[in-house]
Amino acid sequence: MLTSLCIPVHRVLSIFHASTTDDMTYHPDVKQPVDFKPQFDSDGNRVPPSPYSDDEYPVEKEQASLAAAMVPETGPIKSSGSISRTGPLKVNGDVTATASVTLKHDIHVTGKTFSSGTMTLSDNIRIDGRVISTASLKAFDNVIFREDVRASGHIDFRHKVTIKGDLSASGAITLDDGVEISDNIHASGSLNLRGPVKICGNVRSNGSSIFKDEVSIRGGLVITGAFDIAKSGVTTINGNVVCTSSLHVNGKLHIKGDLTVNGSLNHGYGSELTVGGRKTVIGGEHWS
């Protein structure tokens, strides 16, 4: 004769609870939930959280730590002649030379950089302090300037260059392909821009200027020489534009502020010009 087995309800629930929550919480084969905390990069920008915990890939994490630890470090570099360094290298201080300075391939300078001669920076360079060259200055292939940049000669920046300050040159300035400037530009000579170029401040050029491809200027623009928007040019300017000579629009020029042209305003075939404010042309308008 079978006898009934009676188990209290609270005991059944206790067994069920232990067999589910305890196993899910403590079983080593079960992936634990990840606590998504806000992450920020070195510039203070928020980055998307990783779907994996920090200890999920210990090998890769260890390799990254070893790679960072293997970057050589040095103190300030000063020379009565030229300086030439190839990274990877971290310079804790200033770089100063009475002649030329050449830095290339993964170099981080925490201080200022000064040269009495030409300066050439290329291939993953970051400079945290001001940069001054009493001659020409060239930078290309992923270069970051954290403060103002000034050269007594011409400036030539190409292929992913970022300036988080003012940019000024006693000569011409050429910016080509992926250049971003957070403040102002002043060129005593000509100004040649080939996009994409983004300028968050005001722009002034004392020479002739030509803009090609996509150029964006959040501030105003003053050009004392001839100003040419190339046929491939698509230029947007949020502030006022003053051209003391002639203006040739062969591409697209969109001005949200006022436009003042002391010389002639020439419209090329298929060009496009829009002015959000007042347009003043002293030398007359011409269409071709």
Image: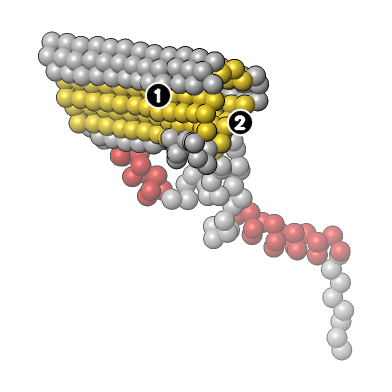
Query: Could you tell whether 38 is left or right of 263 in the image?
Result: right
In the rendered view, would you say 176 is above or below 48? above
**Scheme of image coloration:** secondary structure
Q: Categorize mark 2 by other alpha carbons within 10 Å: few (<14), some (14-19), many (20+).
A: some
* Quarter-of-image position of residue 8: bottom right
Q: Position of residue 218 (x, y in %)?
A: 55, 24
Looking at the rendered image, the quarter that the N terminus falls into is bottom right
Q: Nearer the viewer, residue 13 or 46?
A: 46
Q: Position of residue 108 (x, y in %)?
A: 31, 26
Q: Secondary structure at mark 1?
A: strand
Query: Could you tell whether 48 is left or right of 137 in the image?
Result: right
Q: Which mark is residue 274?
A: 2
**Amino acid type assigned to the residue bearing label 2 in the image:** Thr
Q: Categorize mark 1 by other alpha carbons within 10 Å: few (<14), some (14-19), many (20+).
A: many
Q: Which residue is mark 1?
A: 209
> At 26% across and 15% down in the image, what residue appears?
153
Q: Is residue 257 visible?
A: yes
**Amino acid type assigned to the residue bearing label 1 in the image:** Ser
> At 64% across and 59% down in the image, what residue appears?
23
